[in-house]
């Protein structure tokens, strides 16, 4: 399903069917999820392509957040330690039309329900897309159309034991990679004190050969500004 | 040649008995017009380039700043053209100054209030606010006034001084807000089961925030039924949609499990049997 396709693309499974149908000079994009409404859009294009790839999970049902928060079972990190864990994260699937070096989102959908949360107080915190993940020591097997796998390096830069049970990430800086079997991200969480941390994504795939997904939010902000997730309201 | 000489003469003609000539005035107008055109072009192009990269509020403030900077620069460049002996205008200017001073009191007040509003930012463009008795979405904050579009789509211009001195409620200033429901169930229904059903409905809704988690509890043993209070936190930008959507979902979910919303009821005790009953009994006895 993921990848770059021409206008003959169609995909069908038990729960979804989507693709392009030709109607004279007009290409009609359609998407039907079982139990959901049918989406139809017309595309006027001759030499364009369709790109289907995982995107930052902050767009559905409508965009209210620019952060993703993952809760996991508490981990106790010894002073100055560095360890790598694997978490799962929800994904949304973006369908784009591409022509003459320009990209336009056509549709966004997801196979899993969304949930949002507030990180911090209501007058200073942020709304985040929320998800729970078990902690894995190795890359877990997940459905790549529902969840991705994040390799998270936990770096305790303090001289004290720290308990961590959640991580907050800025959607504007996510670097998502995909293949037919896996969707992935790599990130680091630098723990600055028992209550604060900084998260940052790496521009590297988890497995060799994975393709880089389109960054839905790359063009929407000033490129020189570095977007790291700052956790100032606790790690538990 | 004659035309040129006439034109030169005209341009050098002094105005109002001062050394300020028609030519100077023309230059002033041309430079000011050019600066306004340049400012508008710059702002239009910058808006196009930055509209997807900055919040609307920040962009509008930046564009206004750039616009007025270019116009003021134009004025500064144009000013040497009108450096002239203006002593002839001093008396008239003095009187005019006093008149303008009185007339522009409210303008200056609105201008200063506008500056404070831009610095303090109690409201931003796009926010959902209540200013004095006016409720709606902020469309624009300009130097002299703030424009609000009310919920029924009416354009309201509020002078900045009034905005600055009014009580302002900004519903979007905080990222999340709480709202409540009161749900009544019958006394014969299981309140624990009802709370569980309501919690499941809330759990399934994406915009009922995971944290702070919703609270559902028996608030009151009322006259007509058991009153359950539901307190929900939701993103401030969508709270109204969530509020109008969820109550019906809760009602439907409760009724699907056989739990009903009670009607008002009152039990009345009579010391003696009702006469109506006695009348009804009579025909039976006779028959």
Image: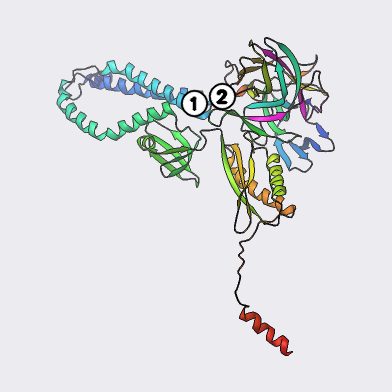
Q: Quadrant of residue A108?
A: top right
Q: Quadrant of residue A14?
A: top right
Q: Which residues are magenta?
A: A128-156
Numbered mark located on residue B158 in the image: none
Instruction: Tell me: residue B282, above or below residue A233.
Output: below
In the rendered image, residue B90 lying in the magenta stretch gets the answer no
- The location of residue B226, given as percent across then percent down, is 64, 53
Mark 1 lies on a secondary structure that is: helix
> In this figure, which residue is indicated by the disc labeled 1?
B58
Letter of the chain that mark 1 sits on in the rendering: B
In the picture, the quarter occupied by the C terminus of chain A is top right
- In the image, B252 versus A216, the foreground residue is B252
Neighbour class for label 1 at 10 Å: few (<14), some, many (≥20)? few
Residue B75 seen from this side = yes
- The location of residue B171, given as percent across then percent down, is 51, 38
> In this figure, which residue is indicated by the disc labeled 2?
B53
- In the image, B238 versus B284, the foreground residue is B284
Neighbour class for label 2 at 10 Å: few (<14), some, many (≥20)? some
> Left or right of B101: which side holds A82?
right
- The location of residue A155, given as percent across then percent down, is 68, 13
- The location of residue A152, given as percent across then percent down, is 72, 17
Letter of the chain that mark 2 sits on in the rendering: B
């Amino acid at each position: 399903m993921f990848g770059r396709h021409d206008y003959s693309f169609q995909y069908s499974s038990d729960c979804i069917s989507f693709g392009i149908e030709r109607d004279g000079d007009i290409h009609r994009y359609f998407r039907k999820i079982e139990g959901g409404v049918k989406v139809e859009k017309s595309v006027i294009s001759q030499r364009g392509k369709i790109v289907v790839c995982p995107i930052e999970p902050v767009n559905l049902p409508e965009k209210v957040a620019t952060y993703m928060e993952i809760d996991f079972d508490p981990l106790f990190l010894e002073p100055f330690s560095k360890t790598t864990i694997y978490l799962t994260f929800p994904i949304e699937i973006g369908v784009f039309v591409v022509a003459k070096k320009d990209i336009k989102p056509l549709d966004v959908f997801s196979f899993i329900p969304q949930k949002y949360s507030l990180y911090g107080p209501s007058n200073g915190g942020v709304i985040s897309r929320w998800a729970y993940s078990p902690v894995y020591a190795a890359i877990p097997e997940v459905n790549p159309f529902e969840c991705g796998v994040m390799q998270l390096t936990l770096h305790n830069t303090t001289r004290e034991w720290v308990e961590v049970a959640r991580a907050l990430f800025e959607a504007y800086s996510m670097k998502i990679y995909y293949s037919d079997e896996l969707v992935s991200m790599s990130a680091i969480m630098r723990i600055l004190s028992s209550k604060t941390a900084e998260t940052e994504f790496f521009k590297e795939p988890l497995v060799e050969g994975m393709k880089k997904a389109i960054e839905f939010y790359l063009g929407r902000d000033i490129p020189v500004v570095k977007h790291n997730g700052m956790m100032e309201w606790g790690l538990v | 040649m004659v035309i040129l000489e006439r034109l030169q003469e005209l341009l050098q003609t002094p105005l109002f008995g001062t050394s300020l000539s028609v030519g100077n005035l023309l230059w002033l107008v041309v430079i000011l017009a050019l600066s306004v055109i340049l400012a508008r072009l710059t702002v239009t192009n910058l808006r196009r380039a930055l509209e997807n990269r900055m919040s609307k509020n920040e962009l509008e403030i930046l564009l206004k700043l750039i616009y007025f900077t270019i116009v003021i620069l134009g004025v500064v460049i144009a000013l040497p053209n009108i450096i002239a002996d203006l002593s002839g205008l001093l008396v008239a200017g003095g009187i005019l100054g006093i008149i303008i001073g009185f007339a522009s009191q409210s303008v200056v007040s609105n201008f200063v209030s506008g500056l404070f509003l831009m610095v303090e930012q109690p409201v931003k463009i796009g926010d959902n606010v209540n200013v004095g008795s006016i409720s709606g979405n902020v469309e624009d904050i300009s130097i002299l006034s703030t424009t609000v579009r009310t919920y029924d789509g009416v354009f309201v211009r509020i002078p900045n001084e009034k905005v600055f001195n009014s009580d302002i409620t900004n519903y979007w200033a905080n990222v999340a807000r709480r709202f409540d429901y009161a749900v009544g169930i019958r006394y014969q229904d299981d309140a624990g089961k009802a709370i569980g059903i309501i919690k499941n409905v809330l759990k399934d809704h994406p915009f009922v925030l995971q944290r702070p988690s919703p609270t559902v509890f028996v608030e009151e043993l009322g006259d007509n039924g058991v009153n359950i209070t539901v307190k929900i936190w939701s993103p401030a930008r969508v709270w109204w949609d969530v509020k109008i959507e969820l109550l019906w979902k809760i009602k439907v979910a409760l009724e699907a499990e056989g739990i009903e919303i009670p009607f008002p009821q009152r039990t009345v005790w009579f010391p003696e049997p009702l006469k109506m009953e006695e009348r009804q009994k009579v025909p039976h006895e006779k028959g």
